[in-house]
Structure formats: structure tokens, C-alpha cells
Image (cartoon, rainbow, N blue to C red):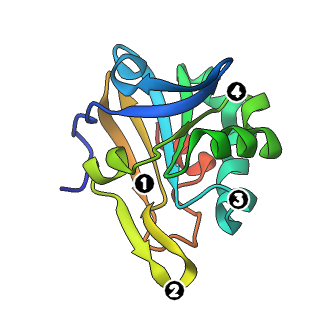
Amino acid sequence: MTISVGSKLPEATLLAMGANGPEAVALGPKLAGRKVAIFGLPGAYTGTCTTAHVPSFIRTKGKFDAKGVDEVICVSVNDPFVMKAWGEATGATAAGIVMLGDADGSFTKAIGLDFDAPAVGLLARSKRYALYAEDGVVKVLHLEESPGVCEISGGESLLAAI
């Protein structure tokens, strides 16, 4: 089942780098009673993800804050080591974007947004999307038709919809 507006986001455990190494991050408490923007993408250090998607949320992070969004989270089917390095390299971490790895792809599969593109070496990856949730319920969902495009899933588009 693909997630849709009105759906409750599933319980999931993602990974982040902490002071002592990888740490489990339970998604449920991050969503409970909060307004959260989540954007998912095919992979760290990949073209459109690095040159368009992440920068769109860096540019708009302050405007999300001004609208009362408690947290902006980037999720990719990558390990937490890569997500930490990528967040630092792009400036996403410095901008206040939380970089979380869905290392085994279980969250991405649970929301029905996984895909394979073996010709370019992407297996069990995430489709490109952005969503806004209140108390874990999806209020806005912008899903790209193609993983190489960042139009409706960019920060500006999601910001305009909330």
C-alpha cells in the first residue's frame, strides 16, 4: 500500500549518527503531537538529490520554522555514516535538517515508496517525495513521477502547500 493523504505514518526505527556512533531513532515519538516535514530521496550523493532536493530544503528551512513546523527530516535508504557525511557536505546538518538513514529500507517499503533501477545501480531505494504530517498523519504528500526529477517534492512546493 502506498501512503496517501490521511494515512497514519507507520512506526519505524531509522538510524542517525550520535556522539558514540549509530543510534536508533524511533519515528513515532518524533511525530507525536508535532508538525513534521519529511522528504525522501533515492540516495545520498546522487545527482538530483544533491544538487536540487536537499538544497531546496536548506533554502526553505527558516520558512518551515516560521510556519510552525517542528522538524524537517531527510530520509534515504542509506546507512547513518553516509547520511551524516552527506548532511555535513551539503550543509543540511548546519541548516538544521535531520538526516536519517533507512538502512534496510523497511520504512520506505512500509509506506510503499520503494523502487528498483538496476540499470543505474539503485536497488531497493526510495522514490522521491516530500510530505507534511501533523501528529503522524499525512496532511500533504508530493510524490514525483520520476526519481530524477525534483519539482513537486522540493522544499518550496511543500512549503506552499501547508
Q: Tell me whether circle 3 and circle 2 mark residues in contact (CB < 8 Å).
A: no
Point 48% across, 39% down: residue: 38
Looking at the rendered structure, the kind of residue marked 3 is Tyr
Is disc 4 surrounded by few (<14), some (14 to 19) or many (20+) residues within 10 Å?
some
Task: Name the residue tied to disc 1.
Answer: 142
Could you tell me which secondary element the residue under label 2 belongs to? helix
Task: Name the residue tied to disc 2.
Answer: 119
Reading the chain from its start, which is encountered first: label 4 or label 2?
Answer: 4
**Residue 135 percent across, percent down from the top left:** 32, 21
- Closest to the camera, between mark 3 and mark 1, is 3
**Residue 111 percent across, percent down from the top left:** 28, 49
Looking at the rendered structure, the kind of residue marked 1 is His
**Residue 104 percent across, percent down from the top left:** 40, 49
Q: Is residue 53 above or below residue 31?
A: below
Measured in 3D between alpha carbons, the distance from the residue under mark 3 to the one under mark 4, in whole angstroms, is 19 Å
Q: Tell me whether circle 1 and circle 2 mark residues in contact (CB < 8 Å).
A: no
Is disc 1 surrounded by few (<14), some (14 to 19) or many (20+) residues within 10 Å?
many
Reading the chain from its start, which is encountered first: label 3 or label 1?
Answer: 3
Q: Which image quadrant is residue 143 in?
A: bottom left
Is disc 3 surrounded by few (<14), some (14 to 19) or many (20+) residues within 10 Å?
some
Q: Which image quadrant is residue 13 in?
A: top left
Task: Name the residue tied to disc 3.
Answer: 45
Task: Name the residue tied to disc 4.
Answer: 96
